[in-house]
Amino acid sequence: MNAGVVIVAIGRELVNGRTLDTNSRSLARSCTMLGLRVTGIHVIDDVASDIVKTMRSALATRPLLIITTGGLGPTADDMTLASVARAVKRTIVKNRRAVAMLERRYTQLYRKGLLHTKGWNEGRIKMAMLPARATPLRNPAGTAPAALLKQGPTTIVCLPGVPAEALAIFDDSVTAWIRRHGPRNVWYERSLKTGSYDESVLRDQLDRVSAAFPDVYIKSSPAGFLKEKSLEVFFTSTGSSKAQVVRRVKGAMDLLRRLMRAGS
């Protein structure tokens, strides 16, 4: 097992360009800031065979965590949970805790006058169907519960596709899970505006800094070629203590400043 995270964003609206996949960006940033390393992001159609293939491929890399978004709703194109169950060779079952969550949520919405009915229908029952032995996660911003299941060394978390719901569940449940089960890493990042507009001019200097500080990931980020003095360099490090990663990053930044002043 590695301490990596794989994100799988599911939905035809994502692959045909109708909807921007903001979930992957937000989740990747949150996981990174919690000390994990995102090793891959997959954006795929809501086709069962595609979901199964992608999940099995991700599981083969033995990551700490796989996060899916999308496809937990009541309609026929919401097929993530059934496909994840198939990928890990489990049945899909009505989860009693998910039923209770949905019942409470729909009753609350009905009493607030936001729904006309509070009973069960086929679509609402579908949202309570989870892979066997999965744990439902409370959805504080919507109705469909998320699902968490363990498969070998990997934990799979299935989140809704609506960004407000996905991020609310991540903050409410997944962050705590990562802090309990993830590596005790500290992530630290700072940036330096170089006053340059040409990456090629700084290439040798950046190579020298990278060689001197191999535990610092250095990435130059131009706003556009020849845009006036737009080149910004980001320095990122992850380690077991904050003092350690801060020292690395500051050392790398100081060295680049000295090299730029010297013009070498």
Image (cartoon, helix red, strand yellow):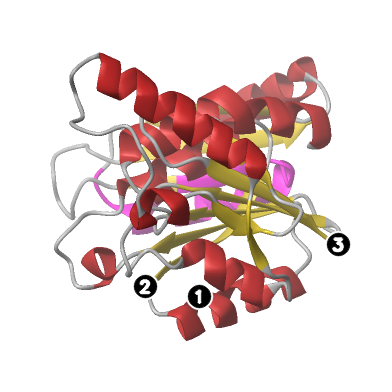
At 40% across and 59% down in the image, what residue appears?
Answer: 71
In magenta, the rendered stretch is: 197-219
Q: Which mark is residue 130?
A: none
Residue at image mark 1: 51
Which numbered disc, 3 or 2, marks the residue that appears first in the sequence? Answer: 2
Above or below residue 134? Residue 175 is: above
- Residue 112 lies, in percent from the top left, at 24, 14
Q: Quick check: marks 1 and 3 in contact, CB under 8 Å?
A: no
Q: Nearer the viewer, residue 116 or 36?
A: 116
Mark 3 residue type = Gly
Q: Amino acid at mark 2?
A: Asp
The answer to the question of whether label 1 and label 2 lie on touching residues, with beta carbons closer than 8 A, is yes
The one of 49 and 27 positioned closer to us in this rendering = 49
Q: Nearer the viewer, residue 185 or 218?
A: 185
Q: Which residue is mark 2?
A: 46
Q: Label 1 to label 2, Cα distance in Å? A: 7 Å
Q: Which residue is mark 3?
A: 152
Label 3 Cα crowd, 10 Å radius (few <14 / some 14-19 / many 20+) = few
User: Where is residue 202 shown, x and y percent of the image?
Assistant: 42, 49
